[in-house]
Image (spheres, coloured by chain):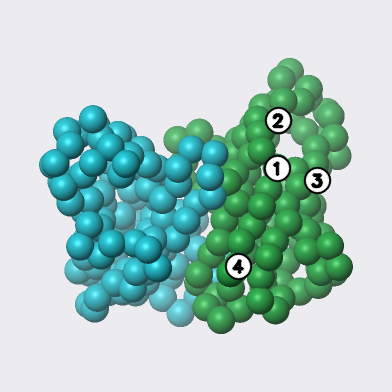
Chain colours: A cyan, B green
């Protein structure tokens, strides 16, 4: 079946540094990818919708200058957490849907656990 | 706004026990409802879904019925196995944007032999 690869699975960084997370669709093209974050014992919250070749659409309350999303190709979207702070520590996960498929064909990466010291 | 609430875990059961994980939702209209499962080190995988009221989704012995009267989509399995140990997420897909998902907080299931 379709696979979405997310890298890295875990990252620890110092406060003030930037961290890039990659999300790749390995065997299909994805015009749209989605980024979520989850705090401990809370829901997986949609952060933004990443559109290939255009600007990402951010959910209310998500800082676009803080969480930079680049969807440069049909198989790769990146999320960069800029000037990370301890409150950005969270579990980030991406998803992608093959172009033209219904929402049942939504595939998820394995997630990235970010810890900011 | 749209949201999903599911029971907190972890849930610990013995093999062959009956499983219920509760899920309720708040949404505009009648969204599609899903259960996703995440095994250790892997991404979320679709377990089952229901797209309209009274639909029953089923897969691998798991079942869930879309109940609009109680706005619920509880997950059940008659006899769990050790291999069912995972985190289960209830989710809904907004009717105004079918790719926009709202997830519950996840319920970790531990099945002991």
Say which of marks 3 and 1 sits in front.
1
Question: In the rendering, at what x and y percent does residue B64 appear?
Answer: 79, 55
Name the residue that disc number 3 marks.
B76
Name the residue that disc number 4 marks.
B2
Q: Between disc 2 and disc 3, whose residue precedes?
A: 2
Q: Do dots 2 and 1 share one subunit?
A: yes
Question: In the rendering, at what x and y percent does residue A109 appear?
Answer: 41, 50
Label 3: which secondary element = strand
Q: Chain of mark 4?
A: B
Residue sitting at x 78%, y 52%: B74
Q: Classify the position of the N terminus of chain B by image quarter.
A: bottom right
Q: Do dots 4 and 1 share one subunit?
A: yes
Q: Between disc 4 and disc 2, whose residue precedes?
A: 4
Q: CA distance from mark 2 to mark 1?
A: 9 Å
Q: Do dots 4 and 3 share one subunit?
A: yes
Say which of marks 2 and 1 sits in front.
1
Name the residue that disc number 1 marks.
B7
Say which of marks 2 and 3 sits in front.
2
């Amino acid at each position: 079946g379709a696979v979405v690869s997310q890298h890295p699975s875990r990252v620890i960084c110092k406060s003030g540094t930037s961290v890039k997370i990659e999300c790749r669709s390995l065997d299909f093209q994805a015009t749209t990818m989605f980024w979520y974050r989850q705090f401990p014992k809370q829901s997986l919250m949609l952060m933004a919708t990443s559109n290939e070749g255009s600007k990402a659409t951010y959910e209310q309350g998500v800082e676009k200058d803080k969480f930079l999303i680049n969807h440069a190709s049909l198989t790769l979207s990146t999320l960069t957490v800029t000037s990370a702070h301890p409150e950005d520590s969270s579990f980030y996960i991406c998803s992608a849907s093959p172009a033209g498929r219904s929402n049942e064909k939504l595939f998820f990466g394995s997630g990235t656990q970010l810890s900011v010291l | 706004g749209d949201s999903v609430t599911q029971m907190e875990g972890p849930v610990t059961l013995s093999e062959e026990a009956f499983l219920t994980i509760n899920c309720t939702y708040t949404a505009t209209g009648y969204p599609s409802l899903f259960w996703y499962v995440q095994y250790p080190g892997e991404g979320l995988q679709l377990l089952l879904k229901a797209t309209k009221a009274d639909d029953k989704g089923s897969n691998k012995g798991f079942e869930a019925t879309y109940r609009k009267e109680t706005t619920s989509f509880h997950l059940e399995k008659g006899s769990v196995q050790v291999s069912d140990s995972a985190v289960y997420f209830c989710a809904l897909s907004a009717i105004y944007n079918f790719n926009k998902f709202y997830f519950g907080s996840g319920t970790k299931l531990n099945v002991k032999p």
